[in-house]
Amino acid sequence: MRMKYISCFVLLYLVTIIVQAAELRIENGYVPEAPPVAPVMAGYLTLVNTTNQPITITASRSDEFKRVEIHNMMMHDGMMHMEKQDRLTIPAHAKVSLEPGGYHLMLINPRRAFRAGEKIKITFVLSSGKQQTVILPVKKTAAPE
């Protein structure tokens, strides 16, 4: 009987961990392949908040880069500018897309060159203190026209 209770407790604990980890879902993530000497790369993905509360990313990092930052492209005095964001909040039951021309990841000073087919691990630090690691594939992309 005691083993049954322990088994139930362990199962409940594992389900709780899985539910907590799924609070921020990642969709359509990728990093465009860049020239081997590129000092920065970009990362794109959609962040989906599956909870009833907003989730705020307060930091990003990767062992593969000197720095990982969230940036936003915005118009200022008729010119497009890129601005570092100290925080990015995903409202409850909402999506925020990091895509070309808007919010995106700046992967600064890669420690090596990345080729299509490789994967890059990035960790987001949340205001709750939790961390969530995502894996973004490196993809060949068409040159902009």
Image (cartoon, rainbow, N blue to C red):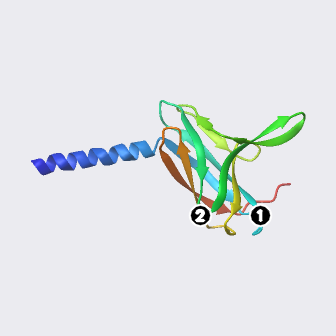
Q: Secondary structure at mark 1?
A: loop
Count of labels in the image: 2
**Mark sitting earlier along the chain (1/2):** 1
Position above or below: 58 against 144: above
Amino acid type at mark 1 = Ala
Res 38 label: 1
Residue furthest to the right in view is: 78
Q: In the displayed structure, does residue 2 sit left or right of residue 104?
A: left
Q: In the displayed structure, does residue 132 sit left or right of residue 118?
A: left
Quick one: quadrant of the C terminus? bottom right
Residue pictured at 52% horizontal, 53% vertical: 133
Residue pictured at 77% horizontal, 60% vertical: 142
Q: Are the residues at dot 1 and dot 2 in contact (C-beta closer than 8 Å)?
A: no
Q: Quadrant of residue 98?
A: top right
Instruction: Report how far apart the C-alphas of labels 1 and 2 lie in the structure.
Output: 17 Å
**Residue at the spot of label 2:** 119
Q: Position of residue 113 (x, y in %)?
A: 69, 69
Position above or below: 41 against 71: below
Q: For the residue carrying disc 1, how many other residues have a C-alpha within 10 Å: few (<14), some (14-19), or many (20+)?
A: few
Residue nearest the observer in this picture, 97 or 80: 80
Q: In the displayed structure, does residue 132 sit left or right of residue 99?
A: left
The nearer-to-camera label among 1 and 2 is 1
Residue pictured at 16% horizontal, 45% vertical: 5
Residue nearest the observer in this picture, 94 or 3: 3
